[in-house]
Amino acid sequence: MNPTLRDANERFDAALQALPLIAILRGLQAAEALAIGSALVAEGWALIEVPLNSPQPLRSIEALSRALPNVLIGAGTVLRVDEVRDVHAAGGRLVVAPNFDAGVVAAALGLGMVCLPGVASATEAFAALAAGASGLKLFPAEMITPAVVKALRAVLPTPARLLPVGGITPASMAAYVDAGANGFGLGSALYRPGLDAAGVSANARAFVSAWRACPTRP
C-alpha cells in the first residue's frame, strides 16, 4: 500500500471511530461551503462530501480542504475516472459513488484516496471489496432495509464497513446499527439547499445524539 493511501485510510479509520457519519452536501453553494463545513465540524463531524452534481463542487471541495485540514473532504456522485482526478486536484481525498465501477475504485486507490462505491446486492458488495473499496455505501437505503443489512453482514467479511445512504433519519438509525451498519451517509435530512449554518448545526446535533444513543453501535 502506498504511503498516501495508508494515510488516507488511517484518517478514515479515525473519523469512523470518532463519528461515522458522512455529511452529504448536495446542492451546496461554494460561497456557503466554509460556513456549513465549520458548523458540522463544531458538532464533531469529520467526513464531508460534496456531490459533483452540486453547483461548482470542486470550488467547494477546494475551499473546505484548505480550511479544514483535519476533516476528510471529498466528492459524491463520482461516476468517471476523470472525475476522480479532478476531485484529487481540488484537494479531496474521499470518493463516494452511487454505483460500483472498478475503474473509479482503482483510480481513487491509485491516487491515495478513500473510496466508497455504492452497492445494492451481495454480488456488487463482494466485487467492490475485491477491487479494494475502503467501505460500502449501501444505496439506496430505502430499499436496503435493516433486514437486508443483517443478511449482508452474515456473509460479508467482518472488517467490511457498511454505510447505508438514502432516506436515513435520526429515528431510523438504531435499527440499522443493530443489524450491523457501521455508520451512515446523511443527505437531505441534514442539509438541503437554502438551509443556513444554524439549521445544519441543529440537524447535525440531532444525528449525533441519535448515533450516540444507539445501544449496539460499534
Image (spheres, helix red, strand yellow):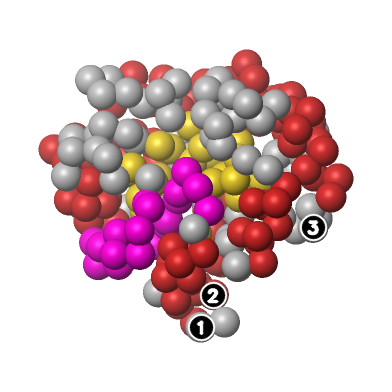
**Residue at the outermost left position:** 31
Earlier-in-chain disc, 2 versus 3: 2
Residue contact between numbered discs 2 and 1, judged by CB atoms under 8 Å: yes
Amino acid type for the residue under numbered disc 2: Arg
Q: Which residue is mark 1?
A: 2
| Magenta extent | 78-100
* Of marks 3 and 1, the one in the foreground: 3
Name the one closer to the observer, 158 or 36: 158
User: Which quadrant, please, contains the N terminus?
Assistant: bottom right
Q: Is residue 82 magenta?
A: yes
Which percent across, then down, holds residue 178? 79, 31
Which element carries disc 1, helix, strand or loop?
A: loop
Q: Which residue is mark 3?
A: 157
Residue in the image at 25% along x and 67% along y:
89
Q: Quadrant of residue 174?
A: top right
Which percent across, then down, holds residue 62? 22, 56
Q: Which residue is mark 2?
A: 6
Earlier-in-chain disc, 3 versus 1: 1
Query: Neighbour class for label 2 at 10 Å: few (<14), some, many (≥20)?
Result: some
The Cα–Cα distance between marks 2 and 1, rounded to whole angstroms, is: 6 Å
Residue contact between numbered discs 2 and 3, judged by CB atoms under 8 Å: no
| Any part of residue 53 in sight | yes
